[in-house]
Amino acid sequence: MRQKQIDLPADRRIKRWYNVIADIPNGVAPPLDPATGQPIGPDKMGAIFPMGLLEQEMSGERWIDIPEPVLDIWQIWRPSPLIRATFLEDALKTKSKIYYKYEGVSPSGSHKTNSAVAQAYFNQREGVKRLATETGAGQWGCALSFAAQKFGLECKVYMVRVSYDQKPYRKVMMNTYGAEIVPSPSPDTPTGRAILAKDPDTHGSLGIAISEALEDAVSRDDTKYALGSVLNHVCLHQTVIGLEAKEQLAMVGDYPDVVIGCCGGGSNFAGLASPFLPDKLAGRKIRLLGVEPTSCPTLTKGSFAYDFGDVSQRTPLLYMYTLGHDFMPPGIHAGGLRYHGMAPVISALMRENLMEATALHQLECFEAGTLFARTEGIIPAPESCHAVRAAIIEATREPDKPQTILFNLSGHGLLDLASYEKFFAGELQNYALPDEAIAEATRNLPKL
Ligand SMILES: *Cc1c(COP(=O)(O)O)cnc(C)c1O
């Protein structure tokens, strides 16, 4: 029998995060205060994030200890399995080896729970009583609802209206974990009320929901804000994925030629791929490949510039690949990889040519996800289908040059079956964002 799942013995468990910023040549540019154009100080950010997380956000230390209480809760699903996709390999008739790190085993079903638990811990440690956040597709809201409950924090989630209506079970899931959830725009904030007054039937957007959650957090002393991707501390928390995977591969004497992850805001890819960077810098041949949808091609077609994280221009300016803060993702796309920006950490790796990126159409991704489900059994989240597809392309491209491939199966798709239903019914279409739309979307980048 071939070995399928690779265990990680207790003495090789991960106890420190890897901070890739320590190793990125030419560094990562600091966030700027949009009012002054100067680097923003921790004092201003202190209104929305706890100091423990801000320290990580600004840290240049290579290794950062993972607190005991975080490790304790992580034990529910960590170490996550590293699985060799033997049945998929057979179906592809490839000599390549395909390994996947499966993050769908977390309580909320994706990698996002890793950072949610860490963020809830640092907030509770500093006396915060309540967290406010936004969620688009719903994965982050579910992850934070669970984490907040574990640390006795209240949690309020502003969920983009269109998802709130289309994904009722996400809402039930968050309620089950004890969170309060409202469709955004909501009557609970000034921004929400203003938008509702103008357009009561609006679908909402992630940018609006971010603005509402931020407003909520700054309006109350007991409340802070939490973000599920993009920021340095989120990417840091996710490095447990890659650190575990390295240890697990070492257990079977393997090492990847290519490491693959889908890229929304960049956190699951950063988590899996960045721990391999030191080897790459030391001369090892390894490719780090980020995968995005053709409908939101931030890394492959975006501009590298300072931009806001939200539509209402409330966040600090981040130096990143961006399609522009007022980019509106096309509604026909089912995947959740629709954010206009990319993590500054990932953007810097791209700038330094230390990673590469590719954009894929959604139909080929759902096809790949379906093949994966029929062979390996797990139904991938629509986002994760992008990584599955890229892994299949790598495994089959040059039959005479088999590779060892590692990809991140960032979550399962059991709460996204409506997307699969649409795919099977032929209701999904491919959509590549036209160049004119990209030029238009990036026209309003802030001028510094
Ligand atoms: C949110 C999400 C993503 C995209 O976010 P990243 O920050 O790029 O990781 C990918 N996969 C799943 C399952 C998600 O929930």
Image: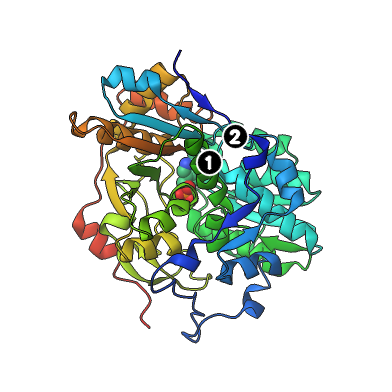
The residue that appears at 20% across and 57% down in the rendered structure is 435
Q: Secondary structure at mark 1?
A: helix
Q: Residues within 10 Å of mark 1 (few under 14, many from 20)?
A: many
Q: In the rendered image, is residue 167 in sight?
A: yes
**Which image quadrant for residue 380?**
top left
Q: Amino acid at mark 2?
A: Leu
Compared across the picture, whether 21 is left or right of 58 comes to left
Q: Amino acid at mark 1?
A: Glu
Query: Is the C-beta of the residue carrying label 2 under 8 Å from the nearest atom of ligand 1?
Result: no
Comes first in the chain, label 1 or label 2:
2
Query: In this figure, which residue is indicated by the disc labeled 1?
Result: 247
Q: Find residue 293 and report its horizontal and vertical position in percent.
A: 32, 45
Q: Find residue 63 and report its horizontal and vertical position in percent.
A: 59, 61
Q: Closest to the observer: 294 or 236? A: 236
From what the image shows, is residue 190 above or below residue 228? Answer: below
Query: In this figure, which residue is indicated by the disc labeled 2?
Result: 8
Q: Find residue 151 and report its horizontal and vertical position in percent.
A: 78, 49
Q: Closest to the observer: 140 or 287? A: 287
The residue that appears at 48% across and 23% down in the rendered structure is 378
Q: Would you say the residues marked 1 and 2 are in contact, meaning their CB atoms lie under 8 Å apart?
A: yes
Compared across the picture, whether 70 is left or right of 111 comes to right
